[in-house]
Amino acid sequence: MEEYEINSSTLAIVPIDDSTSKIYEEETSYIVKKSSNSIIKKNCEFYGSSYQGRCIGTKSLTGIKSKYPIIIEESRNIIFFPTTSSRTQQSTWIALNKIKKYTKNNMVSRVLFKNDLLLDVDISLYSLENQIIRATMLKSKLYERKLEKID
């Protein structure tokens, strides 16, 4: 597969190497011939923004200065966060709203998704929790803005 459109059933984008990724969805998985970061960047554009614009927006809303959680599609609250710096091509991207639970598994973290898929991720439990908190902060800021528009 050459292209992939992130959707509401996308769970995670995991790099296999610098130019190939495995996409996990609720019911299936795909191999895509693109880096995980380029899949994220292409989907930001697909949904009407640039990756850089999404990073600037996250920084403006939250004050976060690195490893930005990214709003892929705002109306459906599709927010992903990276496990490493986006400067590397080897970042796993995880959908915030699909996480059920996470635990430490030896030197990595184990993420349990709402569909009961288990995924071991090369990130410390502390860093994973920090990324989840950052992504939740972004989600909360978006929610607050939506409420302000209603008032």
Image: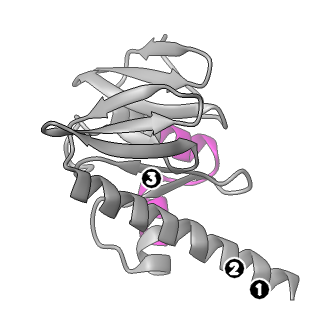
Q: Nearer the viewer, mark 3 or mark 2?
A: 2
**Residue where numbered disc 2 is placed:** 145
Residue positioned most to the right: 150
Main SS category, magenta section: helix
Label 3 element class: helix
Residue 149 coordinates in the image, percent (x, y): 81, 82
Label 2 element class: helix
Residue positioned most to the left: 107
Q: In front here: 120 or 105?
A: 105
Tell me if residue 47 is in the magenta stretch.
Answer: yes
Q: Nearer the viewer, mark 3 or mark 1?
A: 1
Residue 17 coordinates in the image, percent (x, y): 22, 21
Callouts 3 and 2 close, C-beta under 8 Å: no
Tell me if residue 88 is in the magenta stretch.
Answer: no
Residue 122 coordinates in the image, percent (x, y): 20, 37
Residue 22 position by quadrant? top left
Label 1 element class: helix
Number of marks:
3
Callouts 2 and 1 close, C-beta under 8 Å: yes
Amino acid residing under circle 1: Glu
**Residue where numbered disc 1 is placed:** 148
Taking the image as shown, residue 41 lies to the left or right of residue 145, namely left
Amino acid residing under circle 2: Arg
Give the magenta-colored segment's residue range: 41-57
